[in-house]
């Protein structure tokens, strides 16, 4: 019996070794990326690409990076990820929620390769997750929006009613309500992350319905361009979009993945990589606010103070009591604010959102 | 002296055979020039595209996985096109098949339903695809509505219907509102052929369908009818063939195969129902059908070839850092050359030496 176990173990070791040897043909650490959009989308994928370029700058010859762009979140994703593994990549970033299951499948198949999945909730020994507390930035934007809106109506372009987007809408409203308790928000669900045509139509519709500040949770600068044409203030998304609305962009929640990517690649090089769940906020610079522009000085001052308070941990956007749309107080599971778990699975609107959540 | 394109007295069988090869040759030459321009070694790039994927078993399996839905759909489409029925909506029939089959998977989830689940899913998927395909066919036969338009528009209906289901009633309760059903149970999953691989039973089904279509077209009266109705509608009428009947039949078969491909894809490589299950298979299959000259074996080869360009495109992105756009240019060029070369089956080039007296026509 014992001998058998030994043989099995030896065989397993041998197999693992032979699989490994095909992969470490080069000394450089190979780092792979799976992108949802084209690298030139100027939003979500572009920011990941900038972080990849920062990696190359930081580590130079020590690493070799590869990316596959425009990978659909369907049956092709698993193959694309596996292709990166087979090409010898040892650390692979899959940068969209829809890659969660494909990443997990490939991770189970290749226990010696490390995976980093952006914005999902499934993890494994060799599959870490990372995301940002964008709701913090949305709270600041809500305050600014309420100050800038003349009629007290905000226009919000939603992508999909998932917790990340819902918590963004709620944080915006909670921020806006600190300035104007009667603020209203109109929401249009674009049902896409990236479709400049649809995003532009949504922005036009919102403005036509009387919204006078545009905010978005979709990835292209199309809405910013419409706002710019109409001379209405707007917020960028994912990246600095001031080019598309030099006279109207107030600020933008910019994804700055570079520090995180650098720390993870460093850990991989040092042999200290561990599967973790990272949910970084303003304090860790997981995202940053674009310069506050096109607003009066007092609004800018307020935004900067709020940002400092959130960064320092003195202000929690989801401070208890949080009251939902129907007037019920939400259980307070995180001490004096909602717990991370509550925010990550948020499935309700806060009081003041006059909209029915799709599918509810 | 100038060059004209002149109609041949009859179609050239030599060219019909040679033209795909010429097209591939021209594509390779053009791409080599393009690779050289962007500073990549053409030989290495072509190796990454065409040779490397054919030399290891993993890539070969992935080619088969990718080709499976394309071949299944294209076989059905070829029957339509041979009978002069223009089904452009295979994408919608694919989605409806996926939805209908998934219904059983969703309803039996977590129960101890037995091994009947998967066969039932496949049957229902095919049946739903066939019925969905019949809608434009009936509109065509009864009301004379253009099947090109109606079948195409039904794609969007199917797409939005799927969208509604996965965002609403069928949404995974444990999935944080993300638009997807829960993962299917093992009995509702298409089995893989090789442990640890993605190559699944669907590939075998596709091969069976190719064989069946060959027999249908080559050996049966029905197949003969389909071809005659398409090639010579008047002769077919004199022969007593009912072209309306054939439109219904070919649309049903084509919709059924697309539906089958849909449920196989969902119950196979994807494992649950979600939006975006098809990266345009229904439309790519139109290319496959024509690239394969509407012939079952040709379609099998064309499907595998197109799958190769996808897999090869990824390998070129990885090993040569060639952008995805180049792969798209590559696929576009290939089609362009295939269509261009095909015109030589019915036409030929001729040099004209105009005599001095006659003023040159403008053509």
Image (cartoon, coloured by chain):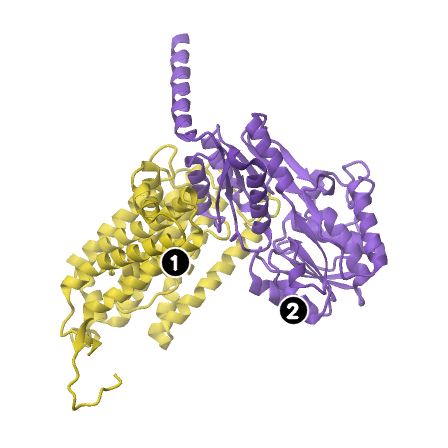
Q: Which residue in the protein does label 2 denote?
A: A204
Q: Could you say which disc has been placed on residue B329 in the image?
A: 1
Relative to residue B363, is residue A210 depicted above or below? above
> Residue A217, percent across and down?
65, 55
Q: Colour of chain A?
A: purple
Whether residue A356 can be seen here: no
> Residue B20, percent across and down?
23, 58
Relative to residue A95, is residue B152 depicted above or below? below
**Viewer-proximal residue, B42 or B236?**
B42
Q: Are marks 2 and 1 on the same chain?
A: no
Chain seen in yellow: B
Could you classify mark 1 by the number of other residues whose Cα lies within 10 Å: few (under 14), some (14-19), or many (20 or more)? few
Q: Secondary structure at mark 1?
A: helix
Q: Residue at x 43, y 29 (%)?
A: A24
Q: Which of the two marks, 2 or 1, is nearer to us in this view? A: 1
The subunit carrying tag 1 is B
* Distance of label 2 from label 1 (alpha carbons): 34 Å
**Viewer-proximal residue, B277 or A23?**
A23
Whether residue B313 can be seen here: yes
In contact (CB < 8 Å): disc 2 and disc 1: no
In the image, is A319 to the left or to the right of B111?
right
């Amino acid at each position: 019996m014992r001998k058998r176990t030994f043989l099995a173990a030896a065989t397993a070791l041998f197999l693992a070794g032979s699989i490994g040897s095909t992969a470490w043909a080069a000394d450089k650490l190979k780092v792979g990326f799976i992108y949802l959009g084209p690298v030139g989308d100027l939003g979500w994928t572009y920011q990941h690409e900038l972080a990849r370029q920062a990696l190359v700058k930081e580590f130079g010859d020590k690493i070799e990076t590869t990316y596959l762009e425009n990978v659909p979140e369907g049956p092709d994703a698993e193959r694309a990820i596996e292709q990166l593994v087979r090409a010898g990549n040892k650390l692979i970033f899959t940068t969209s929620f829809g890659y969660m299951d494909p990443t997990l499948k490939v991770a189970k198949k290749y226990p010696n390769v490390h995976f980093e999945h952006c914005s999902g909730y499934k993890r494994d020994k060799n599959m870490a997750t990372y995301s940002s507390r964008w709701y913090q930035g949305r709270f600041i934007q809500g305050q600014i929006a309420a100050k800038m809106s003349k009629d007290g109506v905000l226009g919000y372009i939603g992508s999909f009613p998932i917790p990340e987007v819902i918590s963004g809408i709620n944080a915006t409203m909670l921020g806006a309500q600190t300035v104007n308790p009667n603020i209203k928000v109109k929401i249009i669900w674009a049902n896409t992350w990236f479709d400049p045509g649809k995003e532009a139509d949504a922005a036009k519709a919102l403005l036509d319905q009387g919204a006078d500040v545009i905010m978005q949770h979709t990835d292209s600068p199309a809405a910013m361009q419409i706002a710019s044409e109409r001379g209405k203030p707007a917020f960028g998304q994912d990246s600095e979009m001031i080019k598309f609305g030099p006279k109207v962009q107030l600020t933008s929640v910019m994804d700055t993945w570079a520090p995180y990517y650098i720390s993870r690649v460093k850990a991989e090089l040092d042999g200290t990589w561990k599967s973790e769940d990272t949910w970084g906020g303003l304090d860790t610079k997981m995202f940053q606010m674009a310069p506050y522009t096109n607003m009066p000085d007092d609004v800018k001052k307020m935004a900067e103070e709020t940002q400092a308070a959130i960064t320092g941990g003195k202000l929690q956007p989801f401070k208890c009591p949080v009251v939902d749309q129907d007037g019920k107080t939400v259980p307070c599971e995180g001490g004096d604010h909602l717990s991370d778990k509550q925010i990550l699975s948020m499935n309700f609107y806060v009081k003041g959102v006059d909209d029915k959540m799709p599918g509810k | 002296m100038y060059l004209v394109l002149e109609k041949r007295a009859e179609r050239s069988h030599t060219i019909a055979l040679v033209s795909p090869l010429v097209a591939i040759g021209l594509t390779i030459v053009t791409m080599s020039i393009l690779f050289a321009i962007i500073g990549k070694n053409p030989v290495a790039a072509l190796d990454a595209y065409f040779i490397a994927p054919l030399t290891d078993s993993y890539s070969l399996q992935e080619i088969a996985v990718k080709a499976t839905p394309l071949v299944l759909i294209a076989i059905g489409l070829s029957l339509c096109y041979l009978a002069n029925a223009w089904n452009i909506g295979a994408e919608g029939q694919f989605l409806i098949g996926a939805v209908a089959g998934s219904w059983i998977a969703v309803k039996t989830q977590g129960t101890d339903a037995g091994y009947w689940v998967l066969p039932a899913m496949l049957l229902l998927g095919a049946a739903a695809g066939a019925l969905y395909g019949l809608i434009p066919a009936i509109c065509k036969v009864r009301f004379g509505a253009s099947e090109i338009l109606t079948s195409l528009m039904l794609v969007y209906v199917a797409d939005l219907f799927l969208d509604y289901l996965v965002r609403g009633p069928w949404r995974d309760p444990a999935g944080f509102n993300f638009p997807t059903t829960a993962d299917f149970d093992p009995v509702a999953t298409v089995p893989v052929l090789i442990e640890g691989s993605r190559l699944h039973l669907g590939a075998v089904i596709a091969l069976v369908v190719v064989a069946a279509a060959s027999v249908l077209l080559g050996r049966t009266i029905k197949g003969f009818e389909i071809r005659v109705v398409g090639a010579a509608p008047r002769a077919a009428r004199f022969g007593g063939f009912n072209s309306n009947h054939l439109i219904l039949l070919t649309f049903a078969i084509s919709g059924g195969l697309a539906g089958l491909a849909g449920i196989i894809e969902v119950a196979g490589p994807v494992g649950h129902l979600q939006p975006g299950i098809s990266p345009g298979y229904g439309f790519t299959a139109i290319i496959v059908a024509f690239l394969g000259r509407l012939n079952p074996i040709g379609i099998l080869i064309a499907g595998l070839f197109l799958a190769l360009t996808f897999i090869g495109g990824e390998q070129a992105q990885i090993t040569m850092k060639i952008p995805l756009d180049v792969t798209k240019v590559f696929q576009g060029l290939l089609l362009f050359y295939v269509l261009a070369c095909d015109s030589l089956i019915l036409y030929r080039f001729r040099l004209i030496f105009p005599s001095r007296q006659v003023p040159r026509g403008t053509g």
